Amino acid sequence: MKIVTPALLLTATLALAACNQTATAPASSTVAASSSSTGCNGEIIRYRAVMSNDLATGHVNQSVYNRVDREIAQAEAACAAGRDAEAVRMVNATKARHGYL
């Protein structure tokens, strides 16, 4: 059994520390606060947050974002009308169409 020397331990620690990168979290306090919402409203809020983040980071272009926004607005109307299950199905269909499932 080999004994690890302090120099070797320090070298390994520094090597691993060099791999760590810090990044700012894209989620805002509004998203974090609303992530506890339930039902269709929660689904809509969370998916809108994901899409906004993807637009801001360049993972989605504006035309795709606009199309998704229109589809989610329809789901939002169904949710507001009390048709929760239909609204959640609409959100899931939009997610599937755009590769988010």
Image: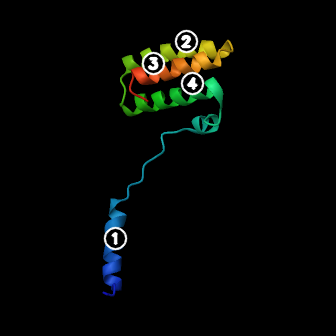
Count neighbours of disc 2 (C-alpha within 10 A) and say few if under 14, some if 14 to 19, many if 20 or more. some
Identify whether 62 is placed above or below 28.
above
The residue that label 3 is drawn on is: 68
Residue sitting nearer the eye, 76 or 39: 39
Q: Is residue 3 left or right of residue 27?
A: left
Q: Is residue 101 left or right of residue 85?
A: left
Q: CA distance from mark 1 to mark 3?
A: 45 Å
Q: CA distance from mark 4 to mark 3?
A: 11 Å
The residue that label 4 is drawn on is: 44
Q: Nearer the viewer, mark 1 or mark 3?
A: 3
The residue that label 1 is drawn on is: 14
Mark 4 or mark 2: name the one nearer the start of the chain. Answer: 4
Count neighbours of disc 1 (C-alpha within 10 A) and say few if under 14, some if 14 to 19, many if 20 or more. few
Q: Position of residue 12 (x, y in %)?
A: 32, 73
Q: CA distance from mark 1 to mark 2?
A: 52 Å
Instruction: Point out which mark residue 42 bears.
Output: none
Q: Amino acid at mark 1?
A: Leu
Q: CA distance from mark 4 to mark 1?
A: 43 Å
Give residue 28's quadrant in the image: top right
Count neighbours of disc 3 (C-alpha within 10 A) and say few if under 14, some if 14 to 19, many if 20 or more. some
Instruction: Point out which mark residue 74 bears.
Output: 2
Q: CA distance from mark 4 to mark 2?
A: 10 Å
Q: Residue at x 65, y 31 (%)?
A: 38
Q: Amino acid at mark 3?
A: Val
Q: Residue at x 48, y 17 (%)?
A: 69
Task: Say which element carries label 1.
Answer: helix
Q: Nearer the viewer, mark 1 or mark 2?
A: 2
Q: CA distance from mark 2 to mark 3?
A: 10 Å
